Amino acid sequence: MLTGDPGTDGTAENVDMATPIPDPLALPWPRRTAHTTLRPLAPDDAVAMHSYRRLPEVCAYLSHGPLSLAEVEQRIAGRLSGIDPTPGRRVRGLAIEHQDRMVGDAMLRTQVDAGQAQLWIGYALHPDVWGHGLATEVAQELCRVGSELGLPVHADAFADNVASLRVLEKAGLARVGTSLDAGRPFVLFASVTDQQSALSAWP
Ligand SMILES: CC(C)(COP(=O)(O)OP(=O)(O)OC[C@H]1O[C@@H](n2cnc3c(N)ncnc32)[C@H](O)[C@@H]1OP(=O)(O)O)[C@@H](O)C(=O)NCCC(=O)NCCS
C-alpha cells in the first residue's frame, strides 16, 4: 500500500464506473520543474525504470522488492490502463526526466474515500540523482497537480525513510497520522487544507 506502490494487475473489471474518479492525465502534459520534466509513462520506459527499481536500496522503503524487467513492463502496462487492483481507484504513472534521461517515476492515484475524492502521490528515483533536490521539485509539482484537479493530496512513507519524510514536508504536506504496515510504522501526510478531514479519516 505504501507510497506509489499499490501495484497493478491490469484487470479492467476493477474500475468502479459508478464513481467519477478524476484522471490526472486529462491535464496538459508534460510539466516542467526547475530541473525535471514530468510526462506520462510509455511502454519503452521499461529498461530505464528497471535500472533503479531492480536495486535493493531503491526498494528498501517501497512495498515491493527488486523488480524484474517483466515486472516493470507489467507495472507500466497497469499505469497505462489506469487500473488499480483496488476498486474505485485510478493509478497513473509519470516518467521523471533530468538532463534528457529518465531518472525516476512518480505515481498519481486518484480515489474516493468516504465520499471525498483524493490524490495520492508517490515517487522513486535512481540513486545516481539522489540528494540534489529532484524529488522535492517533483513532489511540489505533484501537489500542484492536486490543486489543479481540486483534490486534497495525500502520501505516506515508512517512518524510517528519512529522505522521503523530508521531501514530503518540503513539498508542504503535513504529518496527519501514523499507522502500521505488516508491523512496520509509516507516516501519513496530507495537504494542509485537508489536515482536518485527514485527521478524522486516520485517527
Ligand atoms: C526518497 C527519495 C525519492 C529522495 O529523493 P532525493 O531527490 O534525494 O530527495 P531531495 O534531494 O529532494 O531531498 C532529500 C532530503 O532528505 C534529506 N535526507 C536524505 N537522507 C537523509 C538522512 N539519512 N537523514 C536525514 N536527512 C536525509 C536530504 O538532506 C534532503 O533534505 P534537505 O534538502 O532539507 O537537506 C529517493 O531517495 C528515492 O527514490 N528513494 C527510493 C524510493 C523511495 O523511498 N521512494 C519514496 C517512498 S515513500
Image: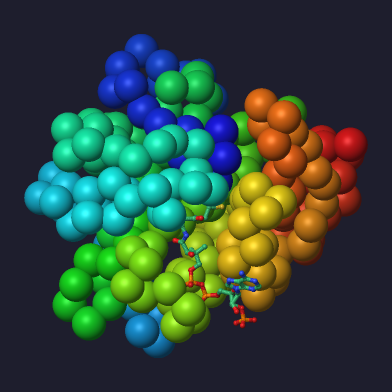
Q: Residue 181 in the image: x percent, y percent?
A: 67, 31
Give the left or right position of residue 176, taking residue 34 as reference: right
Q: Quadrant of the N terminus?
A: top right
Residue at image x 69%, y 36%?
Answer: 184
Q: Give coordinates of residue 74: x percent, y percent.
A: 23, 31
Judge left or right: residue 191 versus residue 6: right
Vertical side of 197 occupied by 104: above or below: below
In this picture, residue 143 sits left or right of residue 181: left
- Point out the residue furthest to the top here: 13
Horizontal and vertical percent position of residue 113: 68, 31
Q: Considering depth in this image, is 5 or 110 the residue closer to the camera? A: 5
Residue drawn 89% across and 36% down?
203
Quarter-of-image position of residue 197: top right
Instruction: Ligand 1: give its quadrant.
Output: bottom right
Res 110 seen here: no
| Residue 39: percent from left, percent from top | 28, 62
Front residue (pair 71, 92):
71
What coloring was used for the rendering? Answer: rainbow
- Which residue appears at 50% of the width and 52% of the height? 122
Query: For the view shown, which residue lies furthest in the front direction?
Result: 56
Which of these two is toward me, 178 or 28? 178
Q: Quadrant of residue 112?
A: top right
